[in-house]
């Protein structure tokens, strides 16, 4: 198993909203997402708006699970809803 594959949640600790993404490079994609958020260029506009309005302090990046099994990734998606569209 590639230990760098998995599901990552970006959590807004103030509103309890969660943005989920799947990654083949967890560390690299977390750095990339943080960079995009810092620059105001993240593809999820509602996540970007919250980040811009509140700042990094209320966000946390959590690795939900490390797996490269597509079925497991799908199961995780069903248990944690992506609250940012």
Image: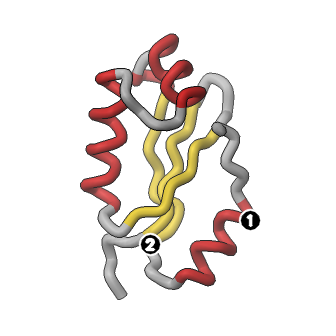
Label 1 element class: helix
Query: Which residue is at a point 33% across and 36% down the rendered structure image?
Result: 34
Compared with 8, 56 (above or below) is above
Name the quadrant of the N terminus: bottom left
* Mark sitting on residue 66: 2
Q: Position of residue 68 (x, y in %)?
A: 44, 80
Q: Position of residue 71 (x, y in %)?
A: 62, 83
Label 2 element class: strand
Q: Which residue is mark 1?
A: 78
Left or right: residue 40 compared with residue 31:
right
Compute the Cα span from label 2 to label 1: 16 Å
Would you say the residues marked 2 and 1 are in contact, meaning their CB atoms lie under 8 Å apart? no
Sequence-first disc among 2 and 1? 2
Compared with 46, 60 (above or below) is below
Mark 1, other Cα within 10 Å: few <14 / some 14–19 / many ≥20? few
Please identify the quarter of the rendering in which residue 6 is found: bottom left
Query: Which residue is at a point 28% across and 44% down the rendered structure image?
Result: 32
Q: Position of residue 48 (x, y in %)?
A: 49, 25
Query: Which residue is at a point 67% across and 33% down the rendered structure image?
Result: 16
Task: Between residue 12 and residue 71, name the one nearer to us.
Answer: 71
Q: Position of residue 64 (x, y in %)?
A: 53, 61
Name the residue furthest top: 53
């Amino acid at each position: 198993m590639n230990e760098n594959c998995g599901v990552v949640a970006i959590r807004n600790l103030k509103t309890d909203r969660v943005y989920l993404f799947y990654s083949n490079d967890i560390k690299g994609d977390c750095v990339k997402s943080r960079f995009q958020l810092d620059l105001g260029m993240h593809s999820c506009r509602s996540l970007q708006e919250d980040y811009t309005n509140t700042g990094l302090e209320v966000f946390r990046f959590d690795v939900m699970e490390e797996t490269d099994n597509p079925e497991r990734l799908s199961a995780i998606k069903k248990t944690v809803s992506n609250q940012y569209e």
